[in-house]
Amino acid sequence: MPVRHTKIVERALTRLKLRQLRLLIAVGQHGNIQNAARDLGISQPAATKMIQDLELDFEVKLFDRTNRGVVPTVFGETLTRHGKLIFAQVSNAAQELDDLNEGNSGRVVVGTLLAASPSLIPLATERLLQDRPNVAIKIVEGTNEVLMPSLLSGEIDLIVGRLSSHRYRSKIQQEKFFDERIVAVSGKEHPLARAGNITFEQLRSCDWILPPAETTLRRQIDQYFIRQDQYVPDVTIESVSYLANRSLLRSNNYVGLMPAHVAAVDVDEGLLAQLDWVVPFGAGPVGVSHRGAEFLSPASKMFLEALRAVAHEAEKA
């Protein structure tokens, strides 16, 4: 290990205080030392001294001063990110101790994308609770753009759903469960619900329920629409809420695009209709993302095992 790196690590281990990291995070949030100091109940000179001590210990400049306050350097951004991770881990440890003290067998926070909502997450939850009935489970719904920062900061243990194809992949571990195709669905009374061999020309007059613009699937949809003579739907609703989407599809003239196994239950039960149109985009891997096995709590590891088991059973079905 290089001498300089060793010196910095020794200083961090012996001198770094959580109060300094709290201040660093607060300064990054406010862009202002005075407001950050007020949040922590210390004076501005004391806050400035704490920042200076951090810069001396790590031998880098953490903030640049501007007319409007301070802006983190690349070193400041990096240390702030790790500081948030440290606080998330401390918070997780405290929560796990509380859970154990109250008789719970640990805690797991799971982020869910649309592709995991109707089957993977519920089945894995049931399986885990059969083995550890006192585990505390929290499920957070969102898109990759919303959930990934929380995963990286330690607020979320696992994300289940469509795997991110580009962004974030260098910072996380991914495990593929299966490949998923996209299907078009509508309400049972939609004019095209019983039509065969549907072409895109027949879909032009439809209203659409689409995923948000920041998702990979939506980018693929937009690119496809552009290739169809710059097609723009008359009405578009953006939503990742399956319950809202299902209600809209059943009561209006909408067409929705979603992973096949997400729609399968409602199609099989006659609540929705799968349109006879081969969607020419959107196929991709579904699986789990996390920061590495060493960051998973015992409860999180058991949830991961439950996910693997239900995904394997789904593949064989």
Image: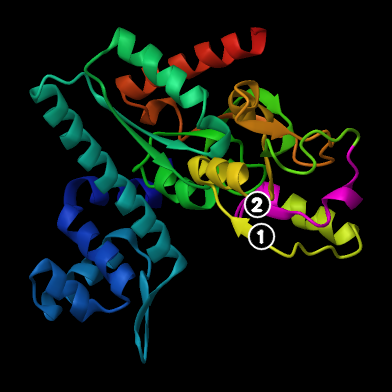
Please determine whether, in this image, residue 129 is positioned above or below residue 204: above
Verify CB contact (< 8 Å) between mark 2 and mark 1: yes
Q: Is residue 209 magenta?
A: yes
Label 2, label 1: how far apart the Cα atoms are: 7 Å
Q: For residue 204: magenta?
A: yes
Mark 2 vs mark 1: which is more N-terminal?
Answer: 2
Tell me which residue sits at (24%, 37%) in the image.
92
Does residue 27 appear left or right of residue 65 in this picture? left
* Residue wearing tag 1: 236
Quadrant placement of the N terminus: top left
SS of the residue under disc 2: strand
Q: In the visual, does 109 lie left or right of 259?
A: left
Q: Residue furthest bottom?
A: 67
The crowd level at tag 1 (other Cα within 10 Å; few <14, some 14-19, many 20+) is some
Q: Range of the magenta residues?
A: 198-218
* Total residue callouts: 2
Which residue is drawn at the image coordinates 53% and 43% (left, top)?
A: 247
Q: Nearer the viewer, residue 123 or 194?
A: 194
Q: Give the amino acid type for the residue marked by disc 2 in the picture.
A: Leu
Q: Amino acid at mark 1?
A: Thr
Quadrant containing the C terminus is: top right
Residue at coordinates 39% horizontally, 52% vertically from top-left? 4
Q: Which residue position holds label 2?
A: 210
Residue 6 x %, y %: 35, 45
Residue 23 horizontal/vertical position (percent) = 21, 65
Badge number at residue 260: none
